[in-house]
Image: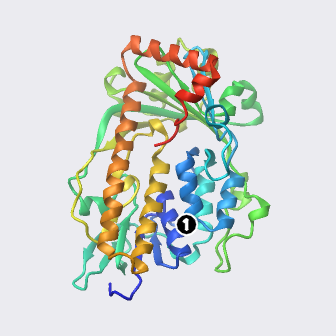
Amino acid sequence: MSANKSPHVIVAGGGIGGLALANGLRKAGVSVAVYERDRHRTDRVQGFRIHINPSGSRALHGLLPEAAYQAFIVSAGKGATRFGFVTEQMKELLNLDSEATEGERDEVDRHYGISRITLRQILLAELGAVVQYDKAITGYAELPDGRVEAYFADGSSAIGDVLVGADGGTSRVRAQRLPRAERVETGIVTVAGKFTLTDESRRRLAPKFLASPLAVMPPKGCGMFIAPHEFDRPDPRYSGIGGNDGAAALVPGALFDNTQPYVFWAYAAKRGDYPGELESLDATQLHDMVNRLTAGWAPELRELVGGSETDTITLIPIRTSVPVPQWETTNVTLLGDAIHSMTPFRGIGANVALRDAQLLCRKLVAAANGEQPLLAAIHDYEAQMIEYGFAAVRDSLTAAEQTVSDNSVGRAIGRTVFRVAEAVPPLKRKMFAGFGSE
């Protein structure tokens, strides 16, 4: 890249982090193109609500056009700031919400909850032709003139001054750029399922499961996460976002009409605590197994698990990235799960990716404006990202290990602490002020 030329940035991957980065660069006038493996912009009609903490909200506010950020604010909020802890007998341990733990904050510096689908569509709304679909990256080459060429599965390629690997936990960019950066099994395995919500099935389900996410804390050895997923609809006040380049603002309403809401659950335990060879079990056998493992739990939880459709039951081994030391900077860098993939047990992965996007955007804009050499800007980003990103990885792994701990004494103490905090609101505010933050 010549000294008087703004860089062209290639982003491999159209997930939350990659799209947020593209929005920020586009907003700042830096040339950017996103190459996404999905064939169409509406392919990812899946996933449950995700928690956006104040750090993530600030990143979105800085990266998105104002109308798109307001669409995020309006679309978020249902059950957004609540999280509960219960025993396996549905005895209440602790209820958290932002008002109870933090008090009122301004609009930007708050916790939100939003459908992953809706957030992705808001992130796509202003990008239009910036995003190209059916472009799965397979690798890249560093060119003699200092630029980088990305190669895609369809035989095409693209040349830019910077390549950002935002292509998730199985990143092809990371595999080539940092082959020593591993993603490994934690020894924890979840079996997950979905309870489809209809007018009739809602009446069979405990209202608590429909209100907000819950963590179930049995005496030892396992845990369960529960989250309702109601699909957001585009708000008519923001139907105009998307500019004049033909980009639709959000997923069409008809798509939501064909998408059934559900309550998601995931039972977690150490691999050795399950009976038999898990990978050899089909969905029916996995479902029967979790029914047996939760046989002594409260009827409400038994209904949730037993009433889920067997074809939704999935085995999910929990993986985590292995921290790596600072590497030599080039014009190929990484963002989000592509470098610091973490367990889902703290619910902060999306927020760390948004933090990456905001920081990298700021550094690339500085380089584009001639305030800093390009490689120095990327180096600064990587140095900071490695520190906070892998700290989040370690914290998430600790939370995962605590969830499946066999230490019954420690679990009993934890449940008592939760009950005491719930009974003393000032203590709860003090103890859980940073809940949900990296």
- Amino acid type, mark 1: His
In this image, 15 relative to 74: left or right?
left
Residue 137 image offset from top left, x and y in percent: 36, 67
Q: Quadrant of residue 171?
A: bottom left
Q: Residues within 10 Å of mark 1 (few under 14, many from 20)?
A: few
**Quadrant in the rendering for residue 331:** bottom left
- 6 vs 75: above or below: below
Pick the front one: 270 or 387: 387
Q: Is residue 339 above or below residue 249?
A: above
Q: Secondary structure at mark 1?
A: loop
**Depicted 133 relative to depicted 309: above or below:** below
Q: Pointer 1: what residue?
A: 40
Q: Nearer the viewer, residue 357 or 432?
A: 432
Residue 337 at least partly seen: yes
Judge whether 406 appears above or below 77 on screen. above
Residue at horizontal 29%, vertical 59%?
A: 174
Residue 112 point in image, percent of width and height: 63, 46
